[in-house]
Amino acid sequence: MTEAKPVPFWAPAEIQGSLRRIIGHLENAGVFAYPTETVYGFGGAADQAGVDALIGMKGRPPGKPFLLLISGSEMLAKLGLHLPTYAAHLAARHWPGPLTLVLPGGERRVPERLRGPEGGIAVRWTPHPGLTRLLRAYGQPITSTSANRPGVPPAMSAGEIVEAWQDEVARGRLMVLDGGRLHPSSPSTVVDCTGRRPRVIRPGAISADILRESVPDLVGNV
């Protein structure tokens, strides 16, 4: 058992100094909590062991997959994910940013537990500077889901997570990165890009009107 203390993840020197420890935790199928541009999230390695560990800790029901965070389009190629032309227009305009795209592809490269009911894999290029440094050092995407227990609002600070998940932190199953208290913000907009036309499946920070400036035939969230 270890003391349930978060890892400082705010100043550039703190972030840089913590990278090796975080990557080691990821490589051992550990789950970690981290600040994003919206709320605190839970995540881990985007392989079967990492996904199984996250499912076990979060208790996510079947049919509700996790999304993937990336730091560049080259990670999409590694995963075998495809950007339809209209999705490429959206990505060029709004990535990095609060836009999640559900993309086709990823067969035999992405755990099927990450595939949603639309048949695609949800991906967001995060603009968070600390996560960007981590993802570039790690060289792989990480999974992402809100850091909360069922029925509880997503955490806005590291302290909330440590308090709610003390046993998991003490046992070394969960590493908490402290990026300070976050300000309330809208979730990312989610667009299904697996069909012939893009479709909003969750309204969020970027309105449909703004998205239609890049893809006029967008469906949903009128």
Image (tube, rainbow, N blue to C red):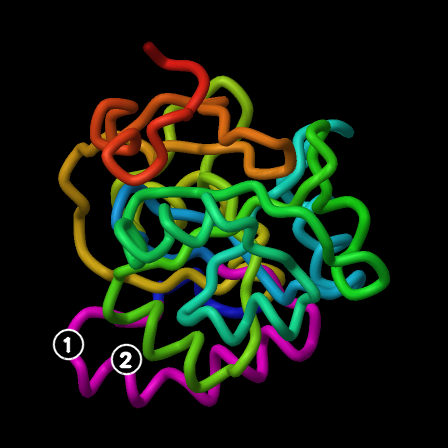
Picture layout, residue 215 above or below residue 177: above
Q: Vertical placement of 94 versus 27: above or below?
A: above
Magenta span contains residue 33: no
**Residue located at (46% from left, 35% from top):** 148
Real-space CA distance between mark 1 and mark 2, rounded to the nearest whole angstrom: 6 Å
Location of the C terminus by quadrant is top left
The span picked out in magenta is 7-32
Q: Identify which amino acid the numbered label 1 is placed on.
A: Ala
User: Residue at left 69%, top 76%?
Assistant: 28
Task: Check residue 14 for magenta coloring.
Answer: yes
Mark 1 falls on what kind of element? loop
In percent of width and height, residue 25 lies at 58, 76
Residue 21 located left or right of residue 160: right
Q: Name the residue under label 2.
A: 15
Q: Where residue 145 sits: x, y (%)?
A: 51, 43
Q: Which residue lies furthest to the right in this view?
A: 108
Please state which of residues 129 and 6 is positioned toward the viewer in this rendering: 129
Task: Find residue 163 and report its horizontal and vertical position in percent.
Answer: 39, 43
- Left or right of 153? Residue 192 is right
Mark 2 and mark 1 in contact (Cβ < 8 Å)? yes
Dot 2 falls on a residue whose secondary structure is helix
Where is the N terminus found, in terms of image quarters?
bottom right
109 lies left or right of 28: right
Quarter of the image holding residue 68? bottom right
Q: Report the residue at 52% width, 82% height from top.
A: 139
To which residue does mark 1 refer? Answer: 11
Q: Which amino acid does label 2 sit on?
A: Ile
